[in-house]
């Protein structure tokens, strides 16, 4: 699902406004996406936010911190924050 106002030639980070194109390598960005369905407070709303690499990892850091705060006194602590959300590593060709 693409954003009709941004083409591959001009995707910019929604936070800092920087271009996400890396010369010689194309677009390099993360996407925060939500599709809210029946029963959700925001039923029928869809969101897609493009983030440059720096803003993406700043966002992950914030989310890890929030998780740590919310689970501070839990008996079982969440797994290591360094892998929070990562589903693959060294997957240079998207084969995972």
Image: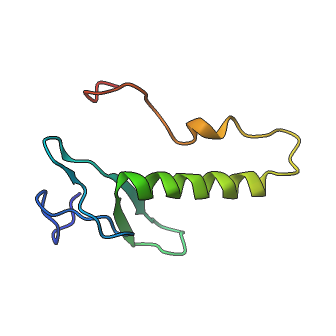
Residue at 34% across, 69% down: 14
Task: From the viewer's side, name the closer residue of 26 and 87.
Answer: 26
Taking the view exactly as shown, the residue that stands out farthest to the front is 23
Please tell me whether residue 96 is drawn above or below residue 77 in the rendered image: above
Instruction: Report x, y in % for residue 54.
Output: 41, 54
| Nearest the eye: 55 or 63 | 55
Using the rendered view, name the quadrant where residue 89 is placed: top left
Residue at 28 percent across and 30 percent down: it is: 94
- 63, above or below 46, in the image: above
Q: Position of residue 16 (x, y in %)?
A: 37, 69
* Residue at 37% from the left image edge and 67% from the top image edge: 47
In the image, what residue occupies the spot 60% across and 58% down? 62
Q: Nearer the viewer, residue 7 or 27?
A: 27
Q: Position of residue 1 (x, y in %)?
A: 23, 57
Residue sitting nearer the eye, 79 or 28: 28
Q: Is residue 30 left or right of residue 24?
A: right
**Which of the colour schemes (rainbow, by chain, secondary structure, one colour) is used?**
rainbow
Image side of residue 35 versus residue 5, left or right: right
Q: Classify the position of the C terminus by image quarter.
A: top left
Q: Position of residue 55 (x, y in %)?
A: 43, 59
């Amino acid at each position: 699902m693409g954003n009709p106002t941004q083409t591959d030639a001009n995707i910019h980070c929604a936070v800092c406004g920087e271009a996400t194109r890396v010369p010689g390598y194309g677009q390099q960005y993360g996407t925060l996406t939500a599709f809210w369905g029946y029963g959700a407070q925001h039923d029928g709303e869809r969101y897609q936010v493009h983030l440059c690499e720096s803003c993406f990892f700043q966002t992950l850091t914030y989310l890890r911190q929030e998780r740590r705060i919310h689970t501070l006194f839990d008996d079982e602590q969440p797994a290591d924050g360094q892998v929070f959300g990562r589903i693959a590593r060294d997957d240079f060709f998207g084969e995972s």
